[in-house]
Amino acid sequence: MEGSKITIDEIEKMPVLSTLLPYWFWNDTTFDRVETLCEKCKKEIGPEMMRGRITETNRSVISLEAYALCYDCQLITPVVPLRIRDDGSLLSKTQTGWKESRYAPEKTIGLLGQLITLFTGGEK
């Protein structure tokens, strides 16, 4: 729901993010942790205190939409939109565009993996 308004009701209906993690890609890369800070108190909030959804863009990329719940401040903090890739990199949305970083060591895919990606375009 990037770019649109979301209601508290909609957020409450989303699963707790820790129930969706770890996420395993087809090549055994694992995305297992996301954290953010409460906008008010700056306390670290982990996936057990977030609600969200993971959308599979294709077999090599997922998008993460999440909202962190700080019960101390009674505040919901949106987590920056993330595009997580199977090569251990991720893109996070900033005010000036997308920033690339790593969540896992870089993997090299074998010849079979390269051929599959070439012929399928990364589709499942």
Image: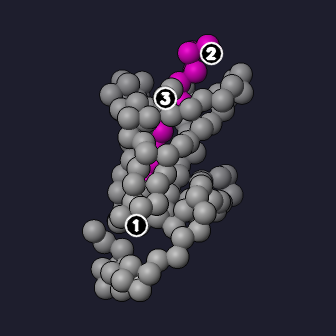
Residue named by callout 3:
48
Task: Report the Cα–Cα distance between label 2 and label 1.
Answer: 40 Å
Q: Which mark is residue 73?
A: 2
Residue 45 x/y as whole percent: 60, 29
Q: Nearer the viewer, residue 95 or 27?
A: 27
What element does badge 3 sit on? Answer: helix
Residue 77 to residue 119: above or below:
above
Label 2 crowd bin: few (<14), some (14–19), many (20+), radius 10 Å: few
Residue 104 to residue 42: above or below:
below
Q: Nearer the viewer, residue 105 or 49?
A: 105
Residue 66 x/y as whole percent: 48, 39
Residue 105 magenta-highlighted: no
Residue found 66% across the figure and 29% down from its top = 44
Q: Residue furthest left?
A: 124
Q: Which mark is residue 56?
A: none
Residue named by callout 1:
27
Q: Is residue 30 left or right of residue 93?
A: left
Residue found 41% across the figure and 86% down from its top = 111
Q: Quadrant of the C terminus?
A: bottom left
Q: From where the camera sits, is residue 5 visible?
A: no
What element does badge 2 sit on? Answer: loop
Magenta stretch? 63-75
First of labels 1, 3 by sequence position = 1
The dominant secondary structure in magenta is strand
